[in-house]
Amino acid sequence: MSERLREKLNILADAAKYDVSCSSSGSNRKNHNKGVGNGHISGICHTYTEDGRCVSLLKILLTNHCIFDCAYCVSRKSNDIERAAFTVEEVVELTMNFYRRNYIEGLFLSSGIFKNADFTMERLLRVVKKLRLEEKYNGYIHLKTIPGASDELIKEAGLYADRMSINLEMPTESGLKLLAPEKSHQDVMKPLGFVQQQIVQFTEEKKLIKHVPQFVPAGQSTQMVVGATPETDKDIMYTAEAFYRNFSLKRVYYSGYIPISNDSRMPLIGSQPPLLRENRLYQTDWLMRFYGFNVREILNDSHPHLDTDIDPKLSWALRNLQYFPVDINTATYQMIMRIPGIGIASAQKIVKARQFGRLHIYQLQKIGVAYSRAKYFITCADTPFQLRDYQATQLKAFILAESQSKYLKTDRQQLALF
Amino acid sequence: MIYVFDQSLEGLLTAIFEWFERKPGAVRLCSTLHYQPDAFSETLFIHTDSEKAGRVWKGLQQRLSKEWLRKLYCCFLSEQEEAFVAFFNCCCILFKQQGAEQNYGDPFVLTVAKLARSVEREKHRMEAFIRFEKAEDGLFYCGIDPDFNVIPLIAGHFTQRYADQRWVIYDIKRNYGIYYDLRQTTEIFLENGLQLLQQKEKVQQDEKEKLYANLWKDYFKSTNIQSRKNTKLHVRHVPKRYWKYLTEKQPE
């Protein structure tokens, strides 16, 4: 029996790993009934895989049987792979035993669609209900909303899950139609909107009545596959921005496409996954959510792709040199955050520290500013006076000469001999 | 002038009290461990006094936010000479000038903030990397040897989370631990605790312990994406000194 369980776990964990959502944050569920588990507001990553991604949740599919045939997915109907399915009891047992040993922060449960959407959703719901009600489990649960499932099932699932998500898969409708003709963005938007509306309703009620149960306290997220279809970075980020805005999503994940099939519509097996591009997209996402940038400042018609050699914040600064240099001792917090080489933590420290006197270079360095990069964009108490203005291309060359990218195998400064 | 104290939090707070009582000017703070007599300066041995310490702590509570009190406490838990000095000087500045903790330009304030951050990071790592093993009698146990003394910081987390199982977390380096008996968490000290935890084979494990350890190792392997391998990043997130705790890093 245990051998079969190991086999199943291998198959179904392997099939679930392409879902990159890993966060376990945002829920403050209490261990109210002296059971096991609670939510940790900032989440805990219990380990990291050898590819450097965090493992905080037991991420598995209930089954990898699927009625759909989406070209980008390993579990597609036409793919000849081993299939397996967990029973409800097996998932519960695995989760509880891993959780009790502090291996994981919670459960991420997804599934291939077998029979139909409602049947699948109902099965997922049975797992979470058993965990919450029978095992008194109060840890984190991330549940996939199955597009097309009935509103009643989704609503009930929301009462037990901490986060729900549906994957957008392709950044544009045309891309999705190309690879998965049976799906559309509309299918995703409807349940996302429904859950969002319920979240709002429950929070409103909570203000009036104390004992309203929690409904998806950690919010919703989605994921897009990058590099399978020929979208620009602008397309991707505009879609992401619209989803953040319309559905108050907590996260949009970008997953570099890892070639898994010989389909002629997509990159060949063996080609490198677009890791650098994925990294730049996440940087842009962060600038949008935490640094007060509008996506149109970073990506627009004259600039539809992110630079590969420099990060998007530096790239924005070089295109907008009219705002620089910024005086650290007088500038607003919002402006300080926009300086390349200064992050949020440093910006906050600067704003607090300057009340006690003008800041000098040595203090900035101590505070944690990447001074070698920031120095081209700031003035502080003892900045050396400089007569000439540098062009954006010159500044870029200076900065690149000093920094090394982990993504470039050979140093840019040196030409290849052969 | 050298102030020598006994490395306890109360001793440190008493030292601050004594400084304000005597106002001796610049003082070098030193713990008994690192004290070396100096022919050219006077030495004051601080007699730890919980009443004086209490008054200083109360004063800090009035002046500081909860967040900053925690930072000071974390800084103390780092058990480093540098931390004690920064704690001492930082508090002296604080009592002289209200709101001085915001002055990140000051080297002592910055040191406190930095060390507190390292301690919090270590605390978070312990919350993440502790791996319980289940003994035959249902006790979940784990031995750790963290860089800083973080057990006081993690006790609350584990008590809230594992409220329906008995567990022990034991600090092998500092030779003390915490035990939860389904009602409350208490500090424990085992005379032969070190040997007990170091000879794990001798503890009677639960029969299913092996199975779940293997399942977890399998899961760890199958969730990895080979074509994205990035060892540098992996080691940055899970530094090698923690591998000895991790079930998934143990050979089969």
Image: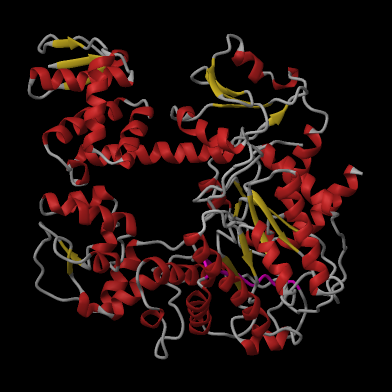
Compared to A366, does A20 lie above or below?
A: below
Q: Residue at x 77, y 61 (%)?
A: A124
Residue A389 in picture, x, y percent from top left: 16, 76
How is the protein colored in the picture? secondary structure
- How many marks the image carries: the answer is 0
Residue A218 appears anywhere in the view: yes
In the image, what residue occupies the spot 24% across and 51% down? A365
The C terminus of chain B appears in which quarter of the rendering? top right
Quarter of the picture holding the N terminus of chain B: top left
Is the residue B28 above or below the residue A119 in the image?
A: above
Q: In this view of the protein, can residue A225 be seen by the observer?
A: no
What's the residue at 66%, 42% (across, down)?
A: A103
Q: Position of residue A219 (x, y in %)?
A: 55, 64
Relative to B141, say whether A300 is above or below.
below
Q: Is residue A211 left or right of residue A75?
A: left
Q: Is residue A350 magenta?
A: no
Say whether residue A390 is left or right of residue A71. left
Residue at image x 17%, y 43%?
B99
Residue range (magenta): A249-260
Residue A160 location, quadrant: bottom right
Nearest the viewer among B156 and A400 is B156
Q: State the residue lying farthest toward the front.
A: A209
Image position of B216 with respect to A115: above or below: above
Q: Is residue A342 left or right of residue A328?
A: right
Q: Position of residue A317 (x, y in %)?
A: 29, 74
Report x, y in % for residue A66. Answer: 83, 72
